[in-house]
Image (spheres, rainbow, N blue to C red):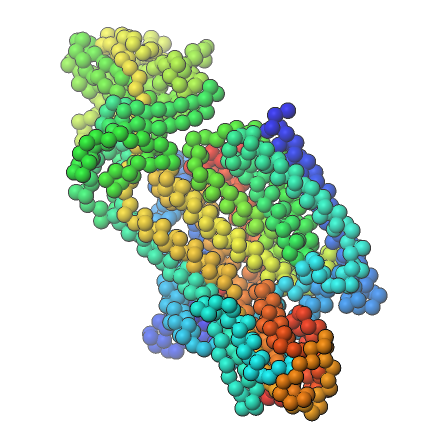
Amino acid sequence: MPTDLVDAMSPATAPPGLPRLGAAGWLRWVWRQLTSMRVALMLLTLLAVVAVPGSLLPQRPQDPAAVARWIAENPGAGAWLDRLGFFDVFASPWFSAVYLLLFASLVGCIVPRIAAHARALRAAPPRAPRRFERFAVRDEVVTTASADDVLAAARAALAGPVRRLPRFRVVEGVEDSGTRTLSAERGYLRETGNLLFHLALVALLVAVAVGQLFHYRGQAIVVEGRGFANSVTDYDTFVAGTAFDPGSLVPFTLTLDEMVAEFAPDGRPVEFRAAVTVREPGAHPAPRPAVVRLNDPLEIGGAKVYLQGNGYAPEVTVRDAAGEVAFAGAVPFLPEDDVYTSRGVIKVPDVSTGDQLGLVGYLLPTAVVGEMGAASVHPDPAAPLLVLTLWRGDLGLDTGVPQNVYELDTARMTQVLEADGTPTTILVQPGETVELPDGLGTLTWDGLPRFAALDLRHDPALGGVLAGAIAALVGLGLSLFTPRRRIWVRATEVSGTGVREAGVGGTGVREGGPGQRTVVGLAGLARGDDLGLPAELARVADAVRALGEAAAVVAGDVGSAGDGTAPQRSAGARDDEGRGDGPG
Amino acid sequence: MGLGELSTVLVWGAATAYAVAFVAFAVDLARLADARAGGRAAGGASAVGGDEGAVEGADVAAADRESVTVAAGPRPGRAAPGAGFAPPATAGGDATARGEGRRRAAGIAMAVTVLGLALHLAGVVLRGVAAGRVPWANMYEFTLVGSLVAVATFVALTRWRDVRFLGAIVLGLAVLALGLALAVFYLPADPVRPILQSYWLVIHVSIATIASGLFTVSFAASALQLLKDSRDAGSPRVGGPRWRMLDALPPTADLEALAFRITAVGFVLWTFTIMAGAIWAEHSWGRYWGWDPKETWSFVVWLVYAAYLHARTTAGWSGRRAAWFVVVGYATVLFNFTGVNLFFQGKHTYAEL
Ligand code: HEM
């Protein structure tokens, strides 16, 4: 239990002492500090602060290109920030240090509280204090009923109607003076919920970490009519946790039958879906059709397949100067804007003679050619146009360095230019065959299939993460909204002497001897702010009043019994001598 | 005029009503302060109608001071909750009955607020009908719904306790929000993009917006708590007669209790918002958490309010210091809502302008 936790319900704890000399003493001191509420509070605040740069600066895992740009634009600061981990904040040592310390603090804080709570769950509610006038929420009733009846009525009101599920845990007691007492407590679930919440946070963190170790995710661009097999080599990009075993990939295959992309006349996207055929090994050998939609991944072989993007992959055939087919196939062009102006590269390495060729340029789905050049006005392929420039030389595919298929490495190539020095542009429409400049061959545009960009992802810890999150939410709700209350009742029978009779409301029922009165004090205490406490106390007081109220006053001894409806909160009630005076 | 334009007209109407209510609430506060000053001159605060906060506050403070000596007493500095603002029905018997006359401005303000709320609600509903979807899919609409929830929370609270003193701040913020929405964020009602076509849009965004509305109200309470606390402590900056209205507010302990209660509900909803967002992200982007700027700032908001909840239970951190967490927390809510959409490139950029 942290020493600086303000807790209305537990006795005040001593402030942390000065560290004793010696290593053990220091360690204990450090641990005490770490598990104090004050440090937890600071670590929470600090974690919020150190998360902020992660949103202000581009982050490498999300957008490596933006990071590179930022560093290029700010050479001095960029290099330093990079060294300090500011471009991967959430994996940086300082961010990790803060949250690991926070969780260490959390565990150190929670474990003793579990033990304390386990004891509290078995313990009886604490004895009634001797004096109630110090409580902000209290009441007093003078009744003609006996102390026995008072306690029975109060107990019934506290326990509630359901025997098996009492609202309050209630114990009775007798003091030396003969005063009967009742101590009641409810709301143990509050602390249970709080512990559940904090433990769930730890579980959540562990589940996320496990997921990081075992997950994999890969991306693949699949053109209509083509397939894809679930193996590491078939992905365009593939990342996995350190504990991932590539042999564990389920070798299913997936064929893209149709990529449907619908747009409104104004170009707004309306719907995307990829119709696929899945072939799983083993249990379902027969091919089965399936659909992948946005917001609706497809599950195969323990992985989920997400539709992340789509675009066009013009099918082209390039013949070299000798008329031989040097390249034939569909080349995905990546859309760069809402009207699918798409950029792509056609690499032609297998020429029979002369230089290798590279064609770079744009696909415009609905091209409008004006004075300023061509532009697309709609994502539908109403008037597709390829606008390409040509490079010749060495594509650099044999250098052993892996290449990006969407970029042309022009280090060993030269661009084919017009006489005036501007690059020669080649415009192609579907079905057309155009001559490449300088007699380098021809290019034929055969068709325009679409492609789907698919993300495959497997995270074995997803269920754990979800369970942790739900447990945290439930614990939080219990912790914040369960009222934790204690109510005490003290019933002192006073003999008739000195009691002035002034029956109120005609409730002059007499029990015990003539003038027999029971003075009943009630007090309530809650953890935190609890608006319901006065009403709870009033309920119990009303149950006692129902036994028969006597607004009798022992002159100078018993204060006003209140107006009979609301708990008395004024400081007017004075101490009754019959109740003893020692500390509670 | 199409439904979408009708909706816009209604929102303009709501903004106007709120502006009127804002002025009336401010007048009410000023009058309360005047009345109080007058009453004091006439013979003591306890005689002033409608001002039982001061009386009960003193009483509670006294009870608390005593309780320190009891081992199991209420925590120091914490008043019995709700002491300062009675339920409206029983607002202090004849003391308030006398005070009611002077609070005519508050009565007008409440009536106009409710009228504005009705227009606002109709505007939001029509917007949804016009667009053929839930009316919270871009910043204009988030602002509309967030301010609707803030005002509705405030009106609901006044049914339960007399918290009309919050009116000036809440309605002031609502006017600002609607003005900003109409002037800067406005977009015609349109169907939503495919990526947003998910029932998680309904769940995640509506809960987020409700939580933001609640945080607005708790911010109002904490801001007043801080101001009043400064005045009580004799700070020269809020000491002058211009800030007299602070004297008419319930005791700071009650403002704190109120702020806490609303923040607690808001925090649970915010926790749920983040979880629902993560589930939606898992469905549509294939990862439940990716430190996108919006996610990062939602996390920051969550941490600040979690720190607030801790501050309230940490020795030496409750009261004033804790209230600052609510203020900072609300600043992060506002930034998450505006700044992140405006300045950062993230996956949430379809929260378009
Ligand atoms: C990951 C970090 C943490 C988060 C997000 C967190 C969050 C919360 C939240 C939201 C509450 C409010 C629930 C309530 O008031 O009943 C709470 C309460 C509490 N937390 Fe934490 N907590 C964290 C770490 C810690 C640590 C390190 C400690 C120990 C030093 C701690 C001790 C407590 C205690 C004692 C309460 C109960 C306060 C009360 O009596 O109401 N927490 N925590």
Please indicate whether residue A554 sits to the left or right of residue A543 in the image.
right
Residue B61 falls in image quadrant: bottom right
Quarter in which the N terminus of chain A is drawn: bottom left
Residue drawn at x 63%, y 39% as measured from the top left: B120
Furthest residue toward right: B42
Residue drawn at x 40%, y 61% as measured from the top left: A196
Q: Quadrant of ligand 1?
A: bottom left
Q: Position of residue B288 (x, y in %)?
A: 37, 44
Mark count: 0
Residue drawn at x 67%, y 89% as measured from the top left: A514
Let me know if residue B247 appears in the view.
Answer: no
Please indicate whether residue B187 sits to the left or right of residue A257 in the image.
right
Q: Position of residue A128 (x, y in %)?
A: 54, 80
A44, above or below A312, in the image:
below
B72, above or below A415, in the image:
below
B115, above or below B214, in the image:
above
Let me know if residue B89 appears in the view.
Answer: yes
Residue drawn at x 39%, y 44% as measured from the top left: B279
Residue A61 falls in image quadrant: top left
Q: Position of residue A113 (x, y in %)?
A: 40, 69
Q: Position of residue B91 (x, y in %)?
A: 72, 61
Please indicate whether residue A69 sits to the left or right of residue A324 in the image.
right
Quarter in which the C terminus of chain A is drawn: bottom right
Residue A16 falls in image quadrant: bottom left
